[in-house]
């Protein structure tokens, strides 16, 4: 059966890494078809707006999108397109796997294999209630945590543990100090965890979690946490495995899911064929898992590991001299 996905080629290195990723997906022979849609600077130039309605309609129709990084122009009147997409489709789960691969700058080769599940819609990032006093000397910020928001993200984490055969979920919080917001999150997490007796639930205060991640990352399988902590922890985890070039991310809602690389548009190397398509390729593997093809997602990851192992056509950031497309071809040849 042919499945259609929305493809957003994005800005900067976006089109290059998307071409490489589609080359690999096509080589897998899955019968995927693609509907191209514009967003970011490319859309602004073509359609006069950063996130055209036609793009939203395409994503809504296909339910699954693969997205390259986008430029949000600096300046007033432009709010983040990524945030707009999350809000529009209520993409409440930000899911970031971090796994150490061979021949990378991973700090703990072979030891890190964890997934951060970050609540994506509330917490400190609601953008409401931010105030700076008239004299500019006092700033306040409102945080919002709800039972509904906490329950669905913790449930997502436990269901992910079940579906991936992982045995442990760590709830990361700061309920000792943030007694209302983090306290509610922890309370709800305990209730949800009780429904999954076969999965160990551990609790960890966020500062300790950061230290433990750096000292003994192998103890973690899935971490689930609120928006701000998840934002920081997932980048810490990206650092553990050698940087953002190997970190994919999924934004998942009940209806729609968008898969991407976590890095930006890398304007310094755009158009030169130097970009590493690895993070977007891993995002495509996550997408295949989500589309009910986990064995194909694993096939893609294995081909990438084999290519890294052989140091075949690696891009400059991995110490090689291969181009973006050389690297994609090397992966495709190992599928
Ligand atoms: P960046 O991630 O684009 O670049 C940081 C450094 O990492 C640069 O030296 C770049 O060359 C390198 N790099 C990034 N991805 C790479 C890849 N795949 N292969 C090899 N090297 C890579 O971060 P920066 O410079 O802060 O942001 C640039 C633009 O990207 C900004 O306009 C920002 O708004 C946008 N951005 C978009 C995101 C998205 O759409 N998801 C996420 C982050 C930033």
Image: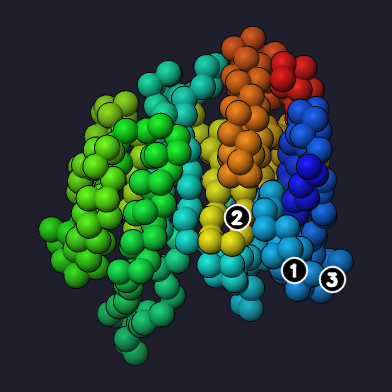
- Image quadrant of residue 257? bottom right
The residue at the far right in this view is 46
Which label's residue is closer to the chain start, 2 or 1?
A: 1
- Tell me where residue 188 appears, x and y as whole percent: 25, 61
Helix, strand or loop at label 3? It is: helix
- Tell me where residue 154 appears, x and y as whole percent: 34, 54
Left-right relation of 172 to 107: left
Residue 280 visible in the current orientation: no
Name the image quarter holding the N terminus: top right
Residue at 22% over, 66% down: 184
Instruction: Determine crowd level at label 2: few under 14, some 14-19, many 20+ residues with C-alpha closer than 10 A.
Output: many
The residue at which mark 1 appears reads as 57
C-alpha gap between disc 2 and disc 1: 14 Å
The residue at which mark 2 appears reads as 257
Camera-side residue of 198 and 89: 198
Camera-side residue of 254 and 250: 254
Helix, strand or loop at label 1? It is: helix
């Amino acid at each position: 059966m042919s499945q259609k996905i929305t493809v957003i080629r994005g800005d900067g290195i976006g089109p290059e890494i998307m071409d490489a990723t589609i080359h690999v997906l096509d080589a897998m022979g899955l019968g995927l078809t693609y509907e191209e849609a514009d967003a970011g600077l490319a859309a602004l130039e073509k359609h006069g707006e950063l996130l055209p309605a036609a793009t939203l309609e395409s994503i809504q129709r296909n339910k699954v999108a693969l997205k390259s990084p986008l430029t949000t122009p600096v300046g007033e009147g432009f709010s983040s397109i990524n945030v707009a997409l999350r809000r529009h489709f209520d993409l409440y789960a930000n899911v970031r796997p971090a796994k150490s691969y061979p021949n990378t700058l991973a700090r703990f080769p072979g030891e890190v294999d964890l997934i951060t599940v970050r609540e994506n819609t509330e917490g400190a990032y609601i953008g409401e209630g931010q105030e700076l006093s008239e004299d500019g000397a006092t700033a306040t910020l409102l945080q919002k945590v709800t039972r509904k928001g906490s329950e669905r993200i913790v449930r997502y984490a436990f269901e992910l543990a079940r579906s991936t055969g992982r045995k442990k979920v760590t709830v990361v919080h700061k309920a000792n100090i943030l007694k209302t917001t983090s306290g509610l999150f922890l309370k709800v997490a305990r209730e949800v965890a009780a429904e999954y007796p076969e999965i160990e639930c551990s609790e960890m205060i966020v500062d300790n979690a950061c230290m433990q991640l750096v000292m003994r990352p192998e103890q973690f399988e899935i971490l689930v946490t609120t928006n701000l902590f998840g934002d920081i922890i997932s980048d810490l985890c990206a650092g553990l495995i050698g940087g953002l070039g190997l970190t994919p991310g999924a934004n998942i809602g009940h209806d729609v899911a968008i898969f991407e690389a976590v890095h930006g548009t890398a304007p310094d190397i755009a158009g030169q064929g130097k970009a590493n398509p690895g993070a977007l390729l891993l995002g495509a593997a996550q997408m295949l898992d989500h589309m009910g093809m986990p064995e194909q997602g694993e096939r893609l990851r294995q081909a990438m590991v084999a290519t890294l192992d052989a140091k075949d056509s690696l891009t400059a950031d991995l110490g090689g001299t291969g181009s973006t497309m050389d690297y994609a071809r090397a992966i495709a040849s190992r599928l």
